[in-house]
Amino acid sequence: MPANADQIIALATPPAGGAIALIRISGPGVIEVADRFFRPRKAPSLDRTPSHRLRYGEIKDGDEVIDEVLVSVFRAPHSYTGEDMVEISCHASPYVQERIIGLFLDAGMRLARPGEFTMRAFLNGKMDLTRAEAVADLVAAENRLQHRAAMHQLRGGFVRDIKRLRDCLVEFTALMELELDFAEEDVEFADRKDLQKTLAEIRRQIQELIDSFAEGNVIKHGVAVSIVGAPNTGKSTLLNALLNEEKAIVTDIPGTTRDAIEDSIRIDGIRFRFIDTAGIRHTRDKVERIGIERTFGKIGEAQIVLWMLDAQRAREQRDETKTRLAEIRRKHPGKPVWILLNKIDLVSPAQVETLMRELRKWDVEDVFSVSAKQKTGLEQLKQALIGRFHSRRLDEGQTVVTNLRHYHALKRALQALGEVEAGLQAGLSGDLIAVDLRDVLHHLGEITGEITTDDLLTHIFQNFCIGK
């Protein structure tokens, strides 16, 4: 953890490519240090500037003007970090940025570590740990859903949910521990029946948060979709059609795709990573066999499998397809599989209808008729994918857990909660139940940062950008 007496400086904008750059400075006395190099135009010096005010002037190294700048002053505790802060808006010339940062380094400041500004905000009580992590999520947000999830967490939606749970448990824990002072009198301050009801409700709420991680993982990392099937069923053509570019090589020669080819597109705010895999068939070709083995590996990674079936050869491939689908279900139980009846432009509508009726009887989640070459039916497929993975909880303003650390802490809290419930059913004494209640509180406190370690903070903030 950094020493808060240090004065830190960092570039908060990308090092090149823009017109304006922002340099951040934080720590005790940084306003006075900035005053050494800043010469205002018709305005008071920085040490006489109130908080949250802008000053226009020049940054000078002795008599040399380095740049014309705008300087923002933020006085403790009313700043992002809770410390005195100065932000310098200068021109984005790499030379100018280096010269200005070099001046302050020579004056005794040091370069900030990744995420150190936000870490100081957390350590100085400006935000809890969930909001600090939401800052990083907001910076990294690439679509509407990621932005909404990050803003909900940044505004305290998640921490309010956790605080409600902890407040209920703290009250009962205090009553349990109070009973220890009256152990000889055999009194109960905490009503066991009320506690059981409260625990059941807390269990329900924690389980809802844990369940929301399935949606949160999709929001944060996207959906992996494996396109699989026999050779020459149109898998590569489908990938090219979805991406609207010639990503994969398409030929009439079976076994053209020998390794996984993948790319991503965004559909209604969700990132879908489509993976075109080697055609599954019996082959003596060593390289092709390796590709087929990798296909089953990609099926394991995917959240949904699109099985391509050639409408012209559907009947002759029926038995082999059923065998392969059974193999997928055996190796990856619960994996959703959709069948795409492809090349419907090459058979009659009556044949398509007959095949679709038969395929709907198979043990798969859904069936679609498409022509990847003509791009027929692809819009319906996209809408079905959106419907399958859309976050309804976000639409309803509920918390969606997107952070793996939060997910594991909630799982540990739920496990500890089970110990409390088991203790109540077994009639354990209040002091033993209080110990298990403390465990639940501990794991919930890990989420908000009330329970932290240096290693945990270092791990969380090391993935931030330097100037944040």
Image: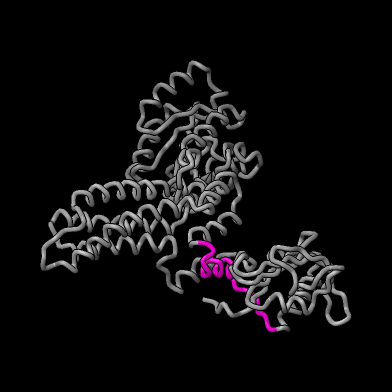
Q: Depth check: give the residue in front, 163 or 257.
A: 163
Q: Is residue 322 left or right of residue 432?
A: right
Stretch in magenta: 108-127
- Vertical relation: 349 (above or below) 411: above
x and y percent of residue 274 in the render? 54, 44
Residue 423 location (% of width, % of height): 17, 58
Where 456 sits versus 308, above or below? Answer: below
Q: Is residue 428 visible?
A: yes
Q: Quadrant of residue 167?
A: bottom left
**Point 38% across, 33% down: residue:** 364
Q: Position of residue 309 (x, y in %)?
A: 47, 32
- The one nearer the camera, 104 or 48, is 48
Q: Is residue 152 left or right of residue 437?
A: right
Residue 295 in sight in this render: no
Residue at 55 percent across and 48 percent down: it is 146
Q: Nearer the viewer, residue 364 or 97?
A: 97
Residue 119 place in picture, x, y as percent: 54, 68
Q: Give the answer, above or below, for where 153 lies relative to 327.
A: below
Q: Nearer the viewer, residue 8 or 33?
A: 33
**Image side of residue 241 versus residue 287, left or right:** right
Instruction: Name which quarter of the figure residue 375 lies in.
Output: top right
Give the number of callouts: 0
Could you say which quadrant of the image residue 97 lies in? bottom right
| Residue drawn at point x = 35 percent, y = 47 percent | 205
Image quarter (top left, top right, bottom left or bottom right) of the C terminus: bottom right
User: Residue 365 magenta-drawn?
Assistant: no
Q: Residue at x 73, y 63 (%)?
A: 53
Name the image colouring: one colour
